[in-house]
Image (spheres, rainbow, N blue to C red):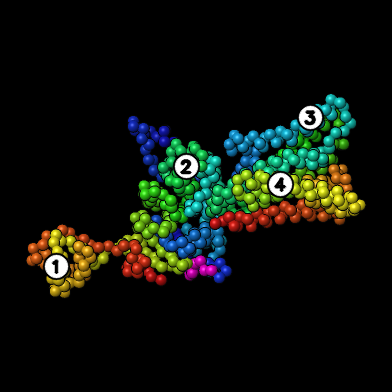
Amino acid sequence: MSETTTPTAGPTGAIHDIGYRHYDGPRLGAAYIARSLYVDTLRGAFGLGRSAKSKIMPFVLLGVMVIPAVTIGIVTGYFGFAELPLGYTRYSFTMQVVITIFLGSQAPAAMSRDLRFRVAPLYFSRPLSRQQYVQAKFAGMSTALFILVGLPITLLFLSALLADLTLEDQLPDYLRAMGGAVVLALVLAGIGLVVAAMTPRRGLGVAAVVGVLLVLSGIQVTVRAMAEEFGSDTFAGYAGLLSPFTLIDGIQAGPLGADSVMGTPPEGAAMATVFCLVAVGLVAGAYAVLLVRYRKALS
Amino acid sequence: MITTEGLTKRYGRVTALESLSIDVQAGVTGLVGANGAGKSTLLKILLGLLPATEGAAHVLDMDVRTDGPAIRERVGYMPEHDCLPPDVTATEFCVHMARMSGLPATAARERTADVLRHVGLYEERYRPMGGYSTGMKQRVKLAQALVHDPGLVLLDEPTNGLDPAGRDDMLGLIRRIGAEFGISVLVTSHLLGELERICDGIVVIDGGTLLQHSTTASVTAETAVVAVEVDGDPTALAARLGAHGVGVQRRGGLLHVDVTDPASYDVVRDAVSELGLGLVRMEQQRHRMTEIFTGSAPGGEHV
């Protein structure tokens, strides 16, 4: 294989041309390629397979996500609290700034690079279709976010069990939080990738993703405060749709039946249905926008 | 290798390709045309990425309409524009691209080492590509098109931006891909002289229509004209040849003599000797590719 092991290499150290060799091995097709791209995207979101420098940020953020969960667990066990001071379903809402920064720093790495350096045409001149490319990137980014959100919640759950809190009390809320984490990961990945795909320039993507999520969060708080001031609880409930974090909280509180972090949570089946539909619409919409974006990137 | 029948592509009211029918054989084929002639559109249709408005195209005996993924598994593509992320090394990049063509990880690494050596990239391949020269970047772009051992590569302006030495290296490499590696090549360029040197066949398109389709051999075939150089004033010789009924044209210090009738050679010899001139050379003239554009080349199917 390598030139140095070629027995015919002369004493001058000249590299002998052993000629061109054809490849007769397997060609594994689009499903394998999509899987490889998915794994690469997931690993890339944590800086694996990238430079040492790009590993720092995601792992610091993962640490920041995990440490409070572990601390809460230890404190609960030490003081023998009857319940966790911070519930599972509130965890992602409480840590939303960390999740936002993670998305802001990693979505451009997953999306904008291929557009900025025009690598995308090289993918599309290979067996993978545009749909499969977007699906693999979307799935990779969603899984990374799910790990970021789900890992601390799971550690919180385990430490609660170690602190002798009963499984029957803990399990329902834990499962609700994990369900919420799945939806949150999909919605956030969609928003983050779309914003990143629209801003291929270096640095801009990070600011744009973080900016969009912070602004949405701010609008949500303002609209809610105004609605509560005017005494319209229904309208205030719908205000939760404005930010992905309150949207997921609404889904956890509505269909999944958890306690909401919001003062005026969504009430009734109609509002719960709206929250679910908006989440589904956001994910489907993001997917559609990405497909259109990559049709343009073909050339 | 590639056949198209009546291939037409319209974008709204703009026609990019107009009933194009070509038949590209194995070996190195040049695709010539000015900017906007429809070269890139043709390549995208051949890769199955763009549907044709009318007509059919087959690549490696597969239909571009239905077998796009299968074609792209067996075809390599080198785009004209920059497409290399600066923060990864050539090795990492090619391994990734090999896997994106469906090669298992181990095979991808072996093929990458092989191909980078063939394109002439050695120690540099472990450095991030951001610091590469244009010549090195073009080599990596070529390597990623070859890394999955395709049956056909489509190269879009591979000599763009290279200095004369780099251009010669690249052309030599393309010639080797066709001759030694046994991979057919469709290469676009707007420089006819380059293609003349390395191509077995040539396709000229202009405004989306086929202008000329022929083999390089027929385009550059011998003509029935001999250039005659003498060490003296050729005027008298020209007059004497004309008197013997031999067609002759003055081209600077040379005489272009029509030798359709082989007896003309004898007439030239006798006339030179009678005038006491020294015969410096007699050279058979060949057609040149640029004649395609003046419309005087033989052997091609004018459409």
Task: Confirm whether residue A166 shows in the render.
Answer: no
The Cα–Cα distance between marks 3 and 2, rounded to whole angstroms, is: 49 Å
Instruction: Give the residues in magenta.
Output: B14-19
The quadrant of the rendering that contains the N terminus of chain B is bottom left
Q: Which residue is mark 3?
A: A71
Residue A90, quarter of the rendered image: top right
Locate residue A240 relative to residue B50 in the image: left or right: right
Give the x, y percent position of residue B109: 51, 40
Q: Residues within 10 Å of mark 4 (few under 14, many from 20)?
A: some
How would you classify the magenta stretch by its main secondary structure? strand
Q: Which residue is mark 2?
A: B132
Give the x, y percent position of residue A157: 80, 34
Q: Secondary structure at mark 1?
A: helix
Whether pointer 4 and pointer 2 mark residues with C-beta atoms closer than 8 Å, the reply is no
Determine if the magenta segment contains residue A281. no
Q: Do marks 2 and 1 share a subunit?
A: yes
Q: Nearer the viewer, residue B71 or B83?
A: B83
Mark 3 or 4 closer to N-term? 3
